[in-house]
Image: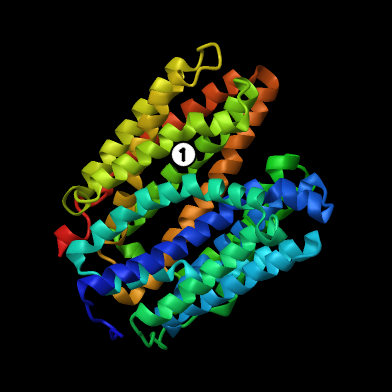
């Protein structure tokens, strides 16, 4: 087994990459397959329809709330040890989901699964930075985009087939049982191939800052999730208000603490700060666009769910094509790839606006816009993260990984909730088409804003700066 700080041989490096990729696939499946399983779960547990959004949101809530702390735990106690503990706990929580006999138990198990996911996921960035030479870091990150895109397409389909096939009479429980098996496989394989690292006991995890951050993010995300279904009523505001106050107190403590939870060195790295902000902005609008496009196709164009998935397939194809094409260029052309991605996304949105008024149910008018948007996303995602992590030292990589993942999770949740709220509000007053037009203008505006941030992003990613 490789020791701390070593660059391991090429064959083993890619086995390590595979283990970390499967861990990220687990995270992706945990946030998507519950949408497919939700009707079966509601019927089997005799649960009200209001439970459905919480099946996915319960996991996302605790994951987003604890990700930064999970990264810092890896810095202190070792990334390998934290990864293995997270994988084992994730598998155990998934098994509890499969055994759930009532809605409350299932939601509690999903919340627990999110906590262990927050311990598992941020360690991957740190381990990859440790085992890959700088010249290959961009290539490794560049592979994540297309492979995750393939999983985003195939995961829900496999989940639906698994429920329909009903092996051993498990029904929807088979989805969580499969999740548990994969989680256990990740932990066992990780124990075989991941390099040992003792951690740094000098890293101090501020308990008060941890509580403030967790409660703050939990309050804001919880309020946003609830507002998507109930609007901005009293309970939604009651969650978001204290959540924002908690985040303000966390920020104040971070600025004054001698042992901040988020390493201050990260925020002296311009590439990291701009990369995180640009990536969060971009992720928020594209995640919201994907969500409301599904609503628009079904409510505005009258497509059934299968035809909706078929119509949106060009977007995933675009992500795959761009990610595979760009992975060899990230090291030397990181900022140019981000610029190209933003330009393609903007072009796709403009084409989307142009065909918005088309009549009928034909899928063809939207094929080119969605494919262009997919190409843009594929160029941006891997490039932004590679540039952001380029100058991060190994000693701060856990905190950096947790911060990046938290920013992505939070921006996805905020974007989906915020843009869907705009879509539903405008749609109720002026119709679905007007709502989609408004959303597309907002996406175009944020894409232009991201482009204006490009001069502050380093020109190249990790390999070309070392």
Q: Is 204 left, or right, of 98 in this rendering? A: left
Query: In the image, is residue 50 above or below residue 112?
Result: above
Query: In the image, is residue 109 above or below residue 296?
Result: below
Residue 289: percent from the left, percent from the top? 51, 35
Q: Is 458 left, or right, of 158 in this rendering? A: left
Can residue 421 be seen here? The reply is yes
Query: In the image, is residue 138 above or below residue 263?
Result: above
**Residue 345, image quadrant:** top left
How many numbered tags mark residues here?
1
Residue at (64, 65) in percent of width and height: 215
Q: Is 459 left, or right, of 269 in this rendering? A: left
Give the class, few, some or many, for how many residues have Cα within 10 Å of label 1's Cα (few <14, many ≥20).
many
- In this figure, which colouring scheme has been used for the structure? rainbow
**Extreme top residue here?**
359
Residue at (50, 31) in percent of width and height: 310
Q: Which residue is mark 1?
A: 286
Quadrant showing the N terminus: bottom left
Residue at (80, 49) in percent of width and height: 43
Q: Is 232 left, or right, of 64 in this rendering? A: right
Residue at (70, 53) in percent of width and height: 54
Residue 217: percent from the left, percent from the top? 60, 59
Circle 1 — which element?
A: helix
Quadrant showing the C terminus: bottom left
Can residue 263 be seen here? The reply is no
Residue 438: percent from the left, percent from the top? 54, 24
Observer-nearest of 377 and 147: 147
Residue 221: percent from the left, percent from the top? 62, 53
């Amino acid at each position: 087994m490789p020791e701390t700080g070593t660059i391991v041989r090429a064959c083993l490096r890619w086995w390590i990459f595979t283990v970390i990729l499967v861990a990220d696939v687990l995270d992706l499946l945990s946030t998507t397959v519950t949408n497919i399983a939700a009707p079966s779960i509601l019927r089997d547990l005799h649960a009200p329809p209001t439970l459905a959004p919480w099946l996915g949101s319960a996991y996302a809530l605790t994951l987003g709330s604890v990700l930064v702390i999970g990264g810092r735990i890896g810095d202190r106690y070792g990334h390998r040890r934290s990864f293995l503990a997270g994988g084992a706990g994730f598998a155990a929580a998934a098994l509890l989901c499969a055994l759930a006999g009532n809605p409350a138990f299932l939601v509690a198990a999903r919340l627990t699964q999110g906590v262990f996911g927050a311990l598992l996921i941020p360690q991957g960035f740190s381990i990859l930075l440790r085992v890959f030479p700088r010249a290959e870091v961009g290539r490794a990150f560049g592979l994540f985009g297309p492979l995750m895109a393939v999983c985003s397409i195939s995961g829900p389909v496999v989940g639906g087939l698994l429920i329909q096939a009903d092996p051993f009479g498990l029904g929807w429980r088979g989805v969580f049982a499969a999740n548990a098996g994969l989680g256990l496989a990740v932990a066992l394989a990780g124990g075989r191939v991941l390099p040992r690292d003792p951690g740094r006991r000098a890293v101090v995890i501020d308990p008060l800052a941890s509580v403030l951050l967790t409660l703050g993010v939990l309050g804001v995300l919880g309020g946003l999730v609830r507002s998507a279904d109930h609007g901005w009523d009293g309970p939604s505001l009651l969650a978001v208000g204290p959540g924002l106050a908690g985040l303000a107190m966390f920020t104040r403590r971070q600025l004054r603490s001698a042992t901040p939870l988020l390493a201050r060195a990260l925020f002296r790295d311009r590439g990291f700060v701009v990369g995180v902000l640009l990536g969060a902005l971009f992720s928020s609008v594209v995640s919201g666009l994907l969500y409301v496009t599904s609503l628009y196709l079904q409510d505005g164009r009258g497509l059934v769910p299968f035809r909706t998935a078929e119509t949106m397939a060009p977007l995933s194809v675009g992500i795959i094509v761009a990610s595979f094409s760009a992975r060899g260029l990230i090291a030397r052309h990181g900022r140019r790839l981000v610029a190209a991605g933003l330009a393609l996304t903007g072009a796709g949105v403009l084409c989307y606006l142009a065909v918005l008024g088309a009549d009928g149910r034909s899928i063809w008018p939207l094929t080119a816009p969605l494919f262009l948007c997919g190409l843009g996303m594929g160029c941006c995602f891997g490039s932004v993260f590679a540039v952001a992590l380029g100058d991060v030292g190994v000693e701060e990589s856990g905190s950096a990984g947790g911060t990046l993942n938290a920013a992505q999770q939070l921006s996805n949740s905020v974007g989906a909730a915020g843009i869907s709220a705009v879509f539903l509000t405008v749609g109720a007053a002026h119709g679905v088409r007007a709502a989609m037009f408004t959303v597309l203008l907002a996406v175009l505006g944020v894409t232009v804003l991201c482009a204006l941030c490009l001069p502050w992003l380093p020109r190249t990613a990790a390999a070309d700066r070392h």
